[in-house]
Image: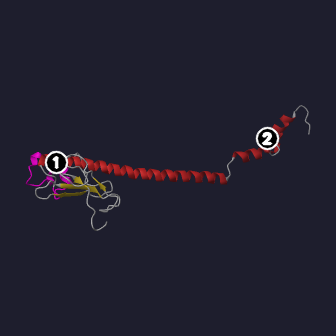
Amino acid sequence: MDCPGKGVDDMDTEGTKGAGIVGLGGRGLMRSARRAFSLLEVMIVIGIILVLSGLIGVTLFARRDEAKQQIVQTKMNNIRQALKLFRLDFERYPTEEEGLAVLWNKELLDPEADTTKWKGYMESPVAKDDWGSEWGYEVEQEPGEEPIVRLWSFGPDKQDGTEDDLKATALGSTGEEDEEGLGDSLLPPEPSGSGG
């Protein structure tokens, strides 16, 4: 197998051109097998990725729900401030017939009210909460007493009187937080007797 004028290295590269695996005595197969991943290894990696993405997804959805609740609470606080401004101008809160829409729509103002006082209390309509339900709004006023105003969102389940209802912060006539309903408060709704 000796060829005159050629060394062993020259013979291997020329004599087995294109078949380097045979010229290496099988070591090439071992190297390529070590470089590739087996199906089992690929499936394990995919499984780990799926588990991690599932955990991240659950966390993100929980954060999304919390964020939506905070947005709704902020919108209720804006409505609450608009209600206070309305009361300063008209010396009353909007009636339930006028509803909250009177804060952005002058045409809904009671015909007996002085329309020149109306200022547009909200820049854009906020007729519904982020779950697509209209806001809960009630005004109670006993003769000789300060009005009690309730403002709330029915929450994600869209049912009145359930645990996920979001309520406006109540303020008493002193300006401090008040859960008892004193003064011209904005109070949460009382749970309805229907239970949902």
The part of the chain drawn in magenta is 95-118
Residue that extends furthest to the top in the rendered view of this protein: 5
Looking at the rendered structure, the secondary structure element under dot 1 is helix
Residue 104 appears in the figure: no
Residue that extends furthest to the bottom in the rendered view of this protein: 194
Give, as a three-letter code, the residue at label 1: Phe
Circle 1/circle 2 CB separation < 8 Å: no
In the image shown, does 158 or 163 lie closer to the viewer? 163
Give the residue number, with chain letter if any, for mark 1: 86
Picture coordinates of residue 125 (x, y %)? 24, 50
Residue 60 appears in the figure: yes
Q: Is residue 188 above or below residue 17?
A: below
Picture coordinates of residue 71 (x, y %)? 33, 49
Q: Residue at x 34, y 60 (%)?
A: 163
Q: Residue at x 15, y 45 (%)?
A: 119
Give the residue number, with chain letter if any, for mark 2: 17
What is the number of callouts on the image? 2
Q: Residue at x 54, y 51 (%)?
A: 52
Taking the magenta stretch, the answer to whether it contains residue 131 is no
In the image shown, does 92 or 131 lie closer to the viewer? 92
Picture coordinates of residue 76 (x, y %)? 27, 50
For label 2, the crowd category at 10 Å Cα-Cα, with few meaning under 14, some 14 to 19 and many 20 or more, is: few
For label 1, the crowd category at 10 Å Cα-Cα, with few meaning under 14, some 14 to 19 and many 20 or more, is: many
In the image shown, does 159 or 146 lie closer to the viewer? 146
Taking the magenta stretch, the answer to whether it contains residue 100 is yes
Looking at the rendered structure, the secondary structure element under dot 2 is loop
Q: Residue at x 37, y 49 (%)?
A: 67
Is residue 113 toward the left or the right of residue 190 in the image?
left
Q: Earlier in the sequence, mark 1 or mark 2?
A: 2
Is residue 117 toward the left or the right of residue 24 in the image?
left
